[in-house]
Image: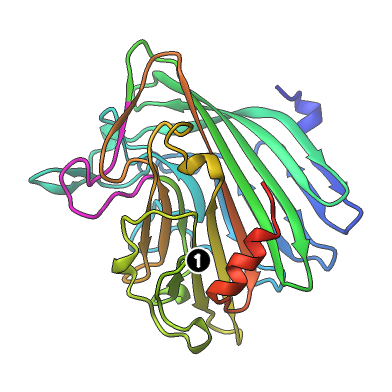
């Protein structure tokens, strides 16, 4: 666990010009040499408990400074950039907002809303060309009981000015500290068809509505032409990566986010449960690495599970070949 002195107002400059700032009790920022803040990781609890108080990334930006996350949109106030969620967990909601109840729909049930408490950073390092930190968190159910301990890893690396892209890696190792199993599900496991959202979730900015979605060997519109994808064909599917391209308001240009699984996530022998994509382009832009889309899974007392994810944040409208080539150049 870091001491208060180690956490307070920490800043470091990497050789390639990255600047990492840490204001104790609030947020960690990563800024490029030209002054563009590409990431702000906010771990200070938001005031509204109904939105499930937990850390999130917002804004997330490209190297050109284009914002590619949304924050508290009017349709879902609990959507906050990029965040770890668990929509259905042993009767609690660690996603935030209304809870789905089969036969009754989505209901405001504040007594179900849990939270994720930031306990500190056990590692915090700015190297020559990357930033890495390890965060310790506790998942707390609505009544105050501690249900799980999480070790979360965040890494910023592979800043490539020529390609106009950089990489954020996000890992989770979760341990059940209850004396009974933790059961992970989703609205779909609770009875709503094709609504399997849970796990690491991205909410895009409003101007990404109607954006293009690509996957390996699959269709979708031509991102250069801004053609919207039929995201229904990707909902609930599996694959090593998924890319989402949107065109910005105000600025003339597109941005692309690539969401990728580490190899072990897709290995049935290594992963606790198979993952599927939750993805929408309309009416809202959203992608989630859903770890319990169609079926529940249980984490026994004292046991742990782990996943690793990668997000490439890029300027421009990338096609399938460019995405695949860039991912190939980034070994795990």
195 shown above or below 121: below
Q: Position of residue 226 (x, y in %)?
A: 47, 85
From the viewer's perspective, is residue 165 above or below residue 249?
above
Q: Which residue does the image show at 77% across and 65% down from the upper left?
A: 160
Q: Is residue 61 visible?
A: no
Q: Judge from the rendering whether residue 123 lies leftward or rightward of residue 144; answer left or right.
A: right
Q: Nearer the viewer, residue 117 or 49?
A: 117
User: Dot 1 lies on which element?
Assistant: strand
The magenta region covers 183-198
Residue 190 lies in magenta, yes or no?
yes
| Nearer to the camera, 75 or 217 | 217
Whether residue 114 can be seen here: yes
How many numbered markers are drawn?
1
Work out whether residue 275 or residue 212 is closer to the camera in this orientation and state it: 275
Neighbour tally class for label 1: few under 14, some 14-19, many 20 plus, Cα within 10 Å: many
Q: Determine the residue located farthest toward the left in the rendered image.
A: 103
Q: What residue is rendered at 83% in x and 56% in y?
A: 18
- Residue labelled with disc 1: 243
Residue sitting at 17 percent across and 50 percent down? Answer: 192
Left or right: residue 245 compared with residue 128: left
Of all residues, the one furthest to the top in this rendering is: 179
Q: Quadrant of residue 219?
A: bottom left
Q: Main secondary structure of the magenta part?
A: loop
Along the horizontal axis of the image, is 179 left or right of 217?
left
Residue 330: x, y in percent?
Answer: 69, 55
Q: Residue at x 39, y 80 (%)?
A: 228
Q: Position of residue 128 (x, y in %)?
A: 88, 48
Q: Quadrant of the N terminus?
A: top right
Instruction: Determine the image quadrant of residue 210.
Output: bottom left
In percent of width and height, residue 200 lies at 47, 46
């Amino acid at each position: 666990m870091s001491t208060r002195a180690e956490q307070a107002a920490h800043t470091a400059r990497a050789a390639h010009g990255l600047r990492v700032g840490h204001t104790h009790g609030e947020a960690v920022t990563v800024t490029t040499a030209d002054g563009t803040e590409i990431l702000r990781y906010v771990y200070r609890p938001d005031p509204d408990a109904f939105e499930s108080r937990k850390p999130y990334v917002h804004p997330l930006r490209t190297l050109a400074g284009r914002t590619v996350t949304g924050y508290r949109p009017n349709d879902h106030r609990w959507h906050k950039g990029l965040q770890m969620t668990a929509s259905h967990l042993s009767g609690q909601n660690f996603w935030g907002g209304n809870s789905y109840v089969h036969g009754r729909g989505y209901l405001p049930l504040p007594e179900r809303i849990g939270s994720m408490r930031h306990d500190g950073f056990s590692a915090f390092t700015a190297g020559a060309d990357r930033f890495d930190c390890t965060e310790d968190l506790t998942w707390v159910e609505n009544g105050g009981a501690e249900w799980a301990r999480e070790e979360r890893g965040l890494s910023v690396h592979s800043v490539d000015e020529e390609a106009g892209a950089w990489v954020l890696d996000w890992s989770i190792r979760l341990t059940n500290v209850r004396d009974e199993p933790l059961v992970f599900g989703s609205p779909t496991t609770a009875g709503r068809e094709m609504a399997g959202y849970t796990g690491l979730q991205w909410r895009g900015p409003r101007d990404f509505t109607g954006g293009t979605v690509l996957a390996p060997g699959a269709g979708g519109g031509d991102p250069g032409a801004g053609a919207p994808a039929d995201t229904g064909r990707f909902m609930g599917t599996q694959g090593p990566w998924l890319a989402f391209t949107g065109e910005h308001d105000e600025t003339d240009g597109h941005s692309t986010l690539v969401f990728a699984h580490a190899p072990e996530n897709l290995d049935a022998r290594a992963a606790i449960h198979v993952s599927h994509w939750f993805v929408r382009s309309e009416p809202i832009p959203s992608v989630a690495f859903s770890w319990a889309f169609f079926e529940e899974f249980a984490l026994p007392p004292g046991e742990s599970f782990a996943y690793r994810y990668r997000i490439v944040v890029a300027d421009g409208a990338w096609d399938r070949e460019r995405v695949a080539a860039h991912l190939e150049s980034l070994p795990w």
